[in-house]
Amino acid sequence: MKRLVSLAAAATVAACAAAHADSAPDCTLKEFASLDIAFDGGAMTVPVKIANADRRMMIDLAVPDTGVRESLANELQLRQLDLPGGIAGVTYAGDKVAKQVVLPDFQIGRIKVENAKVLMFGGNKLPPDVVGILGTGLFDKLDAEIDFKKAKLNLFSPDHCEGNVVYWTDTFASFPFRLGAIHQTYLRAEMDGKTVKTSFATTDEHSSMMLSAAKQLFDLTPDSPGMTVAARNTDGTPSVYRYPFKQMLFGGVAINNPAIDIVVDTGPRCNGTVILDRGDFKTCYGAVDVYLGFNVLRKLHLYIASDERTLYITAADASAPPVPAPSKTP
């Protein structure tokens, strides 16, 4: 799928120009922004400036593109454009998208971008004070550190020595991450001896997997020993189960007793093939086994190295820094 927005590229040009105006490249991490994260109604939000006004946007590590609410676009009378290449039928945050808009000026931390093209969507499922979503495209040309324990999002230049990024501890795991057919970020982990494909659910407090995946990977059924009902439908039938998984491993980083909701699914398990759904043939993208919500992510500290296409993971409370702390750009 063709990327729809150019926010990351524009941000990188602006930030790198400022960072290298008076300095030669070196191995030091160069920090462009350090933002306080707030957890607002299950959303992870950070402050930004749009049209020189303070706003809040949600970080969603499960979508590639950045978008703003239609109400904001109308308020600011933003210029609207057709989607590129005749793209139609785009769904974003549960809404149909037919237009993109131009932000005359956008700022995150000290990074300033002019005339960034982003998607316009309804946004009715967002908290009232959140004006849009920052997708992973922001990190295409920027490194990002997410410190869940300290509630910080730090953005860095990707211009550094390879692997020289984990400055807060000397014990970490590193994984090459890959992007799926619609730019989802996938990461392999191990859970109770089984390899599972994970992705991020940074709009949900709970981590989850489908009952069909639990059956295929762990041979779990509603009648399996240890399975308990966690939620029910209005007619009393179970909608969510819980099972006492023992451990999830990301390399040497362990999450003990991860709480994973096992959601009852009624359709076929997504396996990357074309499926028949309500009379229409659709391509089923994803095939994620476990979606990592905040109840697991809060136990981690992440660094996304964009040029390396590598995700570095440590425990949230890891310490004993082995390398100098990052330098802050002017």
Image (cartoon, grey):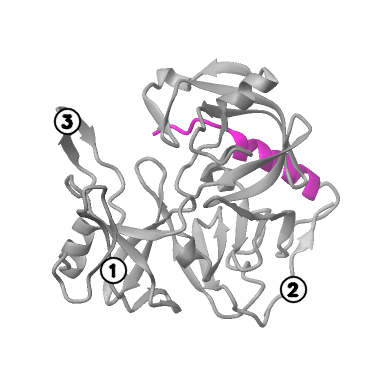
Q: Mark 1 — residue?
A: 195
Residue beneath the point at 70% across and 46% down: 47
Q: Is residue 133 left or right of residue 154?
A: left
Residue at position x 62%, y 70% from top?
Answer: 166
Residues at marks 1 and 3, CA–CA distance in whole angstroms? 32 Å
Mark 2 secondary-structure assignment: loop
Relative to 271, does residue 151 appear above or below in the rendering? below
Question: Which segment is the magenta one?
Answer: 1-20
Say which mark, if any, is on residue 248: none
From the viewer's perspective, tell me whether residue 258 is left or right of residue 36.
Answer: left
Residue 73: within the magenta? no
Label 2 or label 3, whichever lies nearer to me, is 3
Q: Nearer the viewer, residue 14 or 302?
A: 302
Residue 193, given in percent of the width and then of the height, sits at 27, 77
Return the residue at label 3.
Answer: 278
Q: Nearer the viewer, mark 1 or mark 2?
A: 1
Write the residue at 43% across / 78% down.
254
Q: Earlier in the sequence, mark 2 or mark 3?
A: 3
Circle 2: residue type = Pro
5 drawn magenta: yes
Q: Residue at x 58, y 45 (%)?
A: 58
User: Do the residues under discs 1 and 2 have CB atoms within 8 angstroms?
Assistant: no
Rounded to the nearest angstrom, the CA distance separating label 2 from label 3 is 57 Å
Marks 1 and 3, the one that precedes in the sequence: 1
- N-terminal-most mark, 1 or 2: 1
Q: Which mark is residue 324?
A: 2
Q: Residue 106 location in percent, x, y?
A: 71, 34
